[in-house]
Amino acid sequence: MKIAVCVKHVPEQSKRIDPATKRLDRSGEGAINPFDVHAVEEALKLKEDRGGEVVVVSMGPAGAQDSVRKALAMGADSALLITDEAAAGSDLVATTNVLAAALESEAPDLVLFGQQAGDSDGAVLWAAVADRLRRPVISQVADLSVEDGKVRGKRQTEFGYDVIEAPIPAVLAVSDAINEPRYPSLKGIMGARSKPQRTVSLSELGLEGGITGEAGSKTVVQALSDPPPRGDTVKIEDDGSAAEKIVEFLAERKLV
Amino acid sequence: MSTLVFLEHHGNELLKPSLGVLSKATTLDQDVSGVVLGSGVRGLAEQAAKFGASRVFVADRPELEAPLPQPRVDALAGLVRDREFDTVLFASSVLATDVAGGLAARLGAGLNWDLTDLVQQNGSLIGKRPALGDTVYVDVGWKDGPRLALIRPGTFDPQGVAETQSVEIEDLEPQFEDFSLAATMVEQAHAESEGPLIEDADVIVAGGRGLGAPENFKLVEELAQALGGAVAATRAVVDAGWYPYATQVGQTGKSVSPKLYIACGISGAIQHKVGMQGSGLIVAINKDPNAPIFEYSDLGVVGDLNDVVPKLTELVRQRKS
């Protein structure tokens, strides 16, 4: 079974939005999106159980190589990094255009995502990619099994548990409750460099200009502002009357 | 503008966050339609009329019985194209997020998520989105239509309209793609919670590690009950198995914005903060005076929650009786 895991390289510290471009500043140190590490782990477990191969797919700046290497060090077999200045500033639709093209060229049986992007808090990409690939999707999967050409995922929603089944090929997003990711071994880290890694541009994926990057995006960032200030904090120590003070505070605001 | 609001339901009720978005939409656009997708859901259309929808589209089909996203993408894509809606609004949920993502790809449309407000500015629609752990607010827009938006649950309250307008109900006959029907729901175990859902609640009482033990959640539950509110939990206690995931507030759980949020034994790490700092009023009870939650609460109480919470519950009960 061939499993593709999509990973995102996200800024590590001091996240900021560049006021000039209104894009997230991706020039500093980055790391693999922590949610995606769970998807890598789940792919490796499936491979260990059932055989096959795991390919890491990422779209990002050249520095995203670090995140790809981390996944390879954990045990993934190969990697495809799409990096192109013309892809910078891509929104959901533009990113979907690129990832779907890359995934079509890889033709995996399963595509795995983490449950959200740690930088944008987005949780919409897998549904968009699944639609473009015309494959079934199961999101928020906290327990995964594969049997007889089908994948079965258990997940929690606002109302309780769902168990959803889909034929392979399929697209899955896994919750971070699904597993405890392994740490790369020293051998894994040393071996990562020699694993097959391809870096491709948009034209090498057969993508034309205009459908990626800012040009291909349908959303725009118009302005940045500070969060609205909260009122002053009243802080008290409990001297036995804290409960009364809370009730008073709430009563003044007509909340009790 | 021509606005369509995705009206999500559970059982025989339209969900409150969806109705809140519908109410908000009627302040931005005179002609707002709702859409209800499910099986045996025709009766729900009337509910939407009470919140200002002038037209409700209903697809009542067995393929739409399970709350799965892809057949809903098919139904919505057809509707948006046929009727040329330029704006489609969703209240965020597990289902709505997947539907909106799929629809964005299908229509090649712009999707902005996690919005906490929608405004008209110089004739164009602008969404407000807290980003980077809510440290910066971003004004987001769309280059062209259709404009898709996911709104944080609890952002807008449903506002009943004084006089129920006559609502036009139109039946849809969606065409489904084969791949959209490939995923099937094999089991649903819905724990019927006793109190209100946290997305719907005006008051939330939340418990964290500081409770010390799972059985101490009863302190939180009793206070929530006295206030007529819902119980929420932090990531740490959900991971520890003390409380169900459906109640988890924070980055990997839900974002809520009730009128009152009482945090009991919650340190208030950034991952929790992003899920609740939109609350109207935040009261924190924690024995650690340096807990980060005190930096963003309106009233902070440094004290032992085992003393403070039961007393508070008792006082609230007395006031109500």
Image (cartoon, coloured by chain):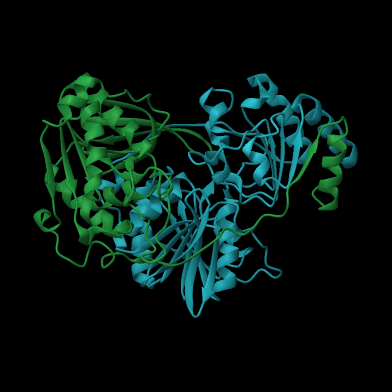
Chain colours: A green, B cyan
Which residue is at 58% across, 33% downward?
B234
Which residue is at 55% across, 58% downward?
B116
Which of B16 and B173 lies nearest the eye of the viewer?
B16
Left/right of residue B104 with respect to residue B200 in the rendered view: left
Depicted B77 relative to depicted B189: above or below = below
Measured as percent of width and height from the top left, residue B42 is found at: 51, 55
Which residue is at 54% across, 22% downward?
B241
Which of A115 and B38 lies nearest the eye of the viewer?
A115
On the image, which quarter does residue A108 sit in?
top left
Measured as percent of width and height from the top left, residue B242 is found at: 58, 23
Which residue is at 65% across, 50% downward?
B279
Depicted A40 relative to depicted A107: above or below = above
Which of B133 and B222 lies nearest the eye of the viewer?
B133
On the image, which quarter does residue A150 sit in?
top left
> Which quadrant is the N terminus of chain A positioned in?
top left
Which of A188 and A4 lies nearest the eye of the viewer?
A188
Q: Is residue A5 visible?
A: no
Measured as percent of width and height from the top left, residue B172 is found at: 40, 62
Measured as percent of width and height from the top left, residue B44 is found at: 56, 55
User: Tag count in the figure?
Assistant: 0
Depicted B65 relative to depicted B223: above or below = below
On the image, which quarter does residue B29 sit in?
bottom right
Depicted B312 relative to depicted A100: above or below = above
Left/right of residue A197 with respect to residue B74 in the rendered view: left
Left/right of residue B65 with respect to residue A73 in the rendered view: right
